[in-house]
Amino acid sequence: MAFTSLDSRLRQVVFKLGGEKHQRFISLYLAWKGVVGELLAERSHPIRIDHNTLFVGVENSAWMQELILLKPKIMKQYKALFHEELQDMVFIIKSKGKKKK
């Protein structure tokens, strides 16, 4: 009996639930650390891809500035990983699921 890793099974479930329409975004979300690096991945996250424009949520304006400066490098890394170009990237200050009371 062949065993598959839990990570592999979870990825399969996420892709199945997301459907074909969202596979591109799910792939990017799961690979975000590989696109921007560990430090920036802790402070940002992809929100959506709309008409080849990537919308990215960023923790605060300081990190937004850092991502803006690295935008050409990030777009190049995206192309290397996914074999397609982004038209643009838009950065929005938005926390990663943390709601203020």
Image: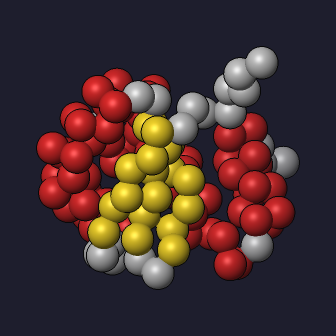
User: Which residue is pictured at 68% across the width and 78% down the height?
Assistant: 21
Q: Is the residue 98 above or below the residue 87 in the image? A: above
The location of residue 37, given as percent across then percent down, is: 32, 35
Residue 72, image quadrant: bottom left
Where 70 sits versus 17, above or below?
A: above
Residue 84 coordinates in the image, percent (x, y): 33, 77
Name the residue located 50 percent from the left edge and 50 percent from the top edge. Answer: 46
Give the farthest residue toward the front: 101
Report whether 101 appears left or right of 38.
right
Q: Residue at x 75, y 55 (%)?
A: 14
Q: Nearer the viewer, residue 5 or 22?
A: 22
The answer to whether residue 31 shows anywhere in this view is no
The answer to whether any part of residue 78 appears in the image is yes
Count of labels in the image: 0
Which residue does the image show at 57% across and 32% down from the upper left? 95
Q: Quadrant of residue 32?
A: top left
What is the x, y in percent for residue 7?
Answer: 68, 40
Q: How is the image coloured?
A: secondary structure
Task: Please name whichever residue, 44 or 92, is drawn nearer the observer in this view of the structure.
Answer: 92
Quadrant where the C terminus is found in the figure: top right
Measured as percent of width and height from the top left, residue 30 is found at 55, 48
Is residue 63 positioned above or below 92 on the image? above
Residue placed most toward the observer, 6 or 74 = 74
